[in-house]
Amino acid sequence: MKTNEKLLGSIYGAALGDAMGALTETRSAEMIKEDFGGFVETLFLPPEDCFAHGMPLGTVTDDFSLAYFTGVELVKSAGVVDEKAARNAVLEWAKHPEFFRFAGPTTQAAVLEMEGGESVNAKAYLACDNSKATNGAGMKIFCVGLINPGNMDKAIEDAVTICMPTHPSNTAISGACAVAAAVSKAMEEKAGLKDVIEAGMYGAAKGFKLGTEKGRRLAVPSVEKRIRLAVEIAERGAGWEETMLELRDVIGAGLMAAEAIPCVFGILAANPQDAFGAVKMGVNIGDDTDTVATMVGAVAGALYGMSNLPVDYLKLISETNGLDIEGLAKKIEEVFYV
């Protein structure tokens, strides 16, 4: 498979997951099935009772848009990943109200501090503010894997750097490193699903260690161990819907990194050789669907390329959001795959 197909598959897979997941976010899987006459498999105008209400067809949220701006900054810096690059990506993204309106609480507070404002943290007195262990680091990090093909340790190192200005906690960093390592491994020509899942567990473990050393310690579940559990659930061989619901019930698909990131790997394990099937499971599992489906699409797209992703939406999503998806894939290839 050509490098560009993998790069485009990852970036477009993430964008598609976000645009579709934005339609179902906050609902339960059962509500999604009831409200939309079956599980969601296409794009349509955002309903009035979701965060993306009133936005045009194909709108992406903070999940893909922040990942995209991170990728653009990595290209600009020619792979020099430091605090400046990490902050520049977030601040440039924050200039776009159509994207920043979706920002999660952890990212919002970080941007306020970066812009010289005073962050009001009512929980600052706590030994551990465990509400900070969110999935916002994992959602924006996949381009770090794309620029480090086959070099998981460098992808993990860069992921930690990118996370520190916004999500400096061991669990958030663990989740981000799981995604970065998985995408890095997926970009190898001969990588398989098992390799990618093992890379995710490796990244989660190493990321937790580095996050504990460099960031804040939080009292939350292990991302690594929950990835293992999620994969075990997926490998039991139940049907597509049954597996999705079991992942939802046991692992969760919510805002916290210890739910969303393990859920991603369970979904990947449940949909071998099927990038779009994996994205659709992320879209329909319920709760934080746009974030989960963004990460699923990024990893599955890097592994399987454009294979069975519906190309009809590529131009629509790019034009609706003013984001050059194909151009970013081309630039990453030119800078990092020479």
Image (spheres, rainbow, N blue to C red):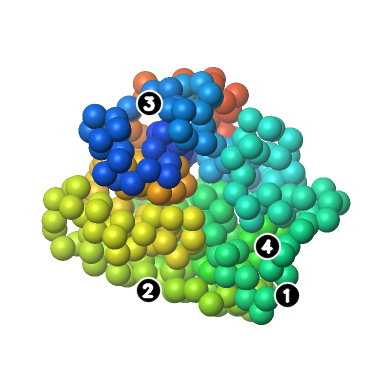
Query: Considering only order in the chain, which callout, 1 or 4, is on the residue closer to the N terminus?
Result: 1
Which residue in the protein does label 4 denote?
A: 164
The image's mark for residue 43 is 3
Q: CA distance from mark 3 to mark 2?
A: 34 Å
Query: Considering only order in the chain, which callout, 2 or 1, is on the residue closer to the N terminus?
Result: 1
Most extreme residue toward the right, as rendered?
Answer: 116
Looking at the image, residue 319 lies above or below residue 10 = above
* Residue placed most toward the observer, 36 or 312: 36
Secondary structure beneath disc 2? helix
Which residue in the protein does label 2 denote?
A: 225
Residue 177 x, y percent position in the rendering = 52, 63
- Type of amino acid at the residue the image marks with label 1: Tyr
Looking at the rendered structure, the number of numbered marks drawn on it comes to 4
Residue 258, visible in the rendered structure: yes
Report if the CB atoms under discs 4 and 3 are less than 8 Å apart: no
Looking at the image, residue 278 lies above or below residue 211 = above
Query: Considering only order in the chain, which callout, 2 or 3, is on the residue closer to the N terminus?
Result: 3
- Type of amino acid at the residue the image marks with label 4: Met
Nearer to us of marks 3 and 1 is: 1
Query: Considering only order in the chain, which callout, 4 or 2, is on the residue closer to the N terminus?
Result: 4
